[in-house]
Image (spheres, rainbow, N blue to C red):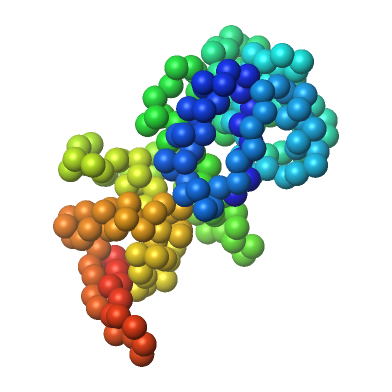
């Protein structure tokens, strides 16, 4: 997954990178960083990006100017704006481009995670080359989903509501029974983190588990939704 961070403040750029690596495993993340909009355009002309984290106030070329130029060039990475710019003109430019989300600095990790999780859901859904069902489109174009709104507001210590939503969204299309590895790959989380949420879903009786015996190797724990 190719991600471009466009941020002229080294400390903020480092925080964005740290936040990303908490959400997307390093092995699945190809990260490029630049501190100005002109260089960002040069990069995008040469290498397609899945996601761009874009500031507005930068030297040489502002984030809004980058968006305008991308529209002219018909280059369309998914974009999350991370900026102190909250005036109408900059927000309108972002809307006209179709940015995925717009976060005002300083933002929390939870809010950042919500944006990146939305991107990952879209990215995963659009990898399917076949037709999309209405429920798939509802997940892309409406928020929150009815299932998300039914989740408890408080969770056991160490669990995040956003990550739980992410795991639930990822495992819904999986063919049952599925393994921890299947769920981790779909959710783009580590096996350890994913298993915590699968265990929670078992404890709350949303999932059931069973043992699958293989011809070679250790038995495998598999999961499926409770009807």
- Residue shown at the point (72%, 23%) measured from the top left: 37
Percent across and percent down for residue 148 are 33, 44
Percent across and percent down for residue 174 are 42, 66
Residue extending farthest to the top is 87
Residue extending farthest to the bottom is 215
- Residue shown at the point (23%, 36%) measured from the top left: 153
Determine if residue 207 is in view. Answer: yes
Determine if residue 99 is in view. Answer: no
Percent across and percent down for residue 9 are 58, 18
The reply, left or right, for residue 2 in relation to residue 143 is right
Splitting the image into 4 quarters, where does residue 151 fall? top left
Q: Is residue 33 above or below residue 23?
A: above
Splitting the image into 4 quarters, where does residue 204 fall? bottom left
- Residue shown at the point (64%, 32%) measured from the top left: 33
The reply, left or right, for residue 223 in relation to residue 46 is left
- Residue shown at the point (55%, 26%) measured from the top left: 13
Percent across and percent down for residue 59 are 72, 14
Q: Nearer the viewer, residue 10 or 66?
A: 10
Q: Is residue 140 above or below residue 195?
A: above
Q: Is residue 210 above or below residue 188?
A: below
């Amino acid at each position: 997954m190719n991600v471009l961070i466009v941020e002229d403040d080294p400390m903020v750029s480092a925080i964005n990178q740290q936040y990303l690596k908490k959400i997307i495993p390093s092995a699945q993340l190809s990260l490029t960083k630049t501190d100005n909009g002109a260089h960002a355009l040069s990069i995008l002309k040469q290498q397609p990006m899945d996601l761009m984290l874009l500031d507005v106030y930068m030297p040489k070329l502002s984030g809004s100017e980058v968006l305008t130029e991308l529209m002219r060039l018909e280059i369309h990475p998914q974009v999350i704006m991370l900026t102190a710019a909250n005036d109408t003109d900059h927000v309108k430019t972002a809307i006209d481009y179709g940015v995925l989300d717009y976060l005002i600095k300083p933002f929390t990790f939870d809010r950042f995670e919500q944006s990146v999780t939305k991107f990952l859901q879209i990215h995963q859904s659009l990898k399917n080359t076949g037709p999309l069902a209405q429920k798939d489109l509802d997940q892309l174009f409406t928020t929150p989903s009815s299932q998300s709104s039914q989740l408890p507001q408080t969770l056991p210590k160490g669990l995040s509501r956003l990550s739980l939503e992410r795991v639930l969204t990822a495992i819904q299309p999986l063919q049952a029974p599925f393994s921890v590895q299947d769920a981790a790959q779909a959710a783009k989380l580590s096996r350890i983190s994913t298993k915590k949420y699968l265990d929670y879903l078992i404890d709350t009786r949303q999932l059931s588990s069973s043992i699958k015996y293989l011809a070679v190797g250790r038995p495998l724990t598999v999961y499926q939704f409770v009807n």
